[in-house]
Image: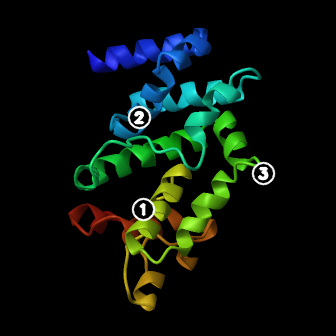
């Protein structure tokens, strides 16, 4: 029932954002983005927010909820937030990917005043490997690239089997050479 109620609030926000904002609906939508681990619902929530940001008369309604100082869960204990950290990280990750996969999301993240992309790139400067790794995974997911294997050895990283090799040229039987490197070794590859 919660999912259906959130979907109704999203539809109401698209039709009449002023009333939804006065009754706390926008706050509910923004909290649901962080708490929802289902990609389709998360994408619908982000699309609703991006639509409201993109409309000429609604950004000022969302402004109090998107300021830097705004905290979504002011009355939640810090211990409880740490328990839900992984779930919230997954939800935030899906929200960022959904925002980057829409034109209005890209435009809003690239605006000079918002500096959304600058904030994301600035996360790479934080001395926390978990945050860096998470952001790089998000960037790989946005561009639909396979996430490379994490290693401490530089030479091992260069020997990644998925990396393009000289034997994969079109004129040199590239398909067979690529299959030998990428696919697991087994009896089917003896035919190549």
Mark 2 element type: helix
Q: Residue at x 69, y 41 (%)?
A: 108
Q: Say which label, 1 or 3, has the lower sequence index.
A: 3
- Decide: few, some or many residues near mark 1? Use Cα within 10 Å; few <14, some 14-19, many ≥20: some
Mark 1 element type: helix
Identify the mark at residue 112; answer none if there is no mark: 3
Does residue 186 appear left or right of residue 139 in this picture?
left
Residue 175 is situated, as x and y percent measured from the top left of the image, at 49, 62
Residue occupying the far front of the picture: 75
Total numbered labels placed on residues in the image: 3
Q: Which residue is mark 2?
A: 31
Q: Residue at x 30, y 44 (%)?
A: 76
**Quarter-wise, where is residue 59 in the image?**
top right
Q: Say which label, 2 or 3, has the lower sequence index.
A: 2
Callout 1–callout 3 Cβ contact below 8 Å: no
Q: Nearer the viewer, residue 73 or 16?
A: 73
Q: Which residue is mark 1?
A: 134
Between the residue at mark 1 and the residue at mark 3, the CA separation in whole angstroms equals: 25 Å
Between the residue at mark 2 and the residue at mark 1, the CA separation in whole angstroms equals: 21 Å
**Quarter-wise, where is residue 31 in the image?**
top left
Give the answer, above or below, for where 120 lies relative to 62: below
Give the answer, above or below, for where 55 lies relative to 4: below
Q: Say which label, 2 or 1, has the lower sequence index.
A: 2
């Amino acid at each position: 029932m919660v999912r259906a109620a959130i979907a109704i609030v999203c539809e109401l926000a698209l039709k009449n954002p002023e009333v939804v904002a006065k009754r706390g609906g926008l706050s509910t939508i923004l909290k649901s983005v962080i708490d929802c681990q289902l990609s389709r619902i998360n994408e619908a929530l982000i699309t609703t927010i991006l639509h409201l940001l993109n409309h000429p008369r609604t950004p000022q309604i969302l402004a109090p909820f998107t300021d830097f100082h705004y905290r979504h869960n002011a009355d939640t204990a810090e211990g409880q937030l740490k328990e839900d950290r992984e779930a919230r990280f997954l939800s935030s990750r899906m929200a960022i990917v959904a925002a980057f996969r829409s034109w209005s999301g890209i435009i809003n993240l690239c605006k000079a005043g918002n500096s959304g992309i600058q904030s994301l790139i600035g996360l790479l400067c934080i001395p926390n490997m978990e945050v860096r790794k998470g952001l790089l995974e998000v960037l790989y997911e946005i561009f639909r690239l396979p996430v490379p294997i994490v290693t401490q050895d530089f030479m091992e990283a260069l020997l990644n089997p998925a990396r393009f090799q000289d034997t994969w040229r079109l004129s040199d039987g590239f398909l067979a050479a690529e299959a030998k490197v990428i696919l697991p070794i087994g009896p089917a590859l003896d035919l190549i």
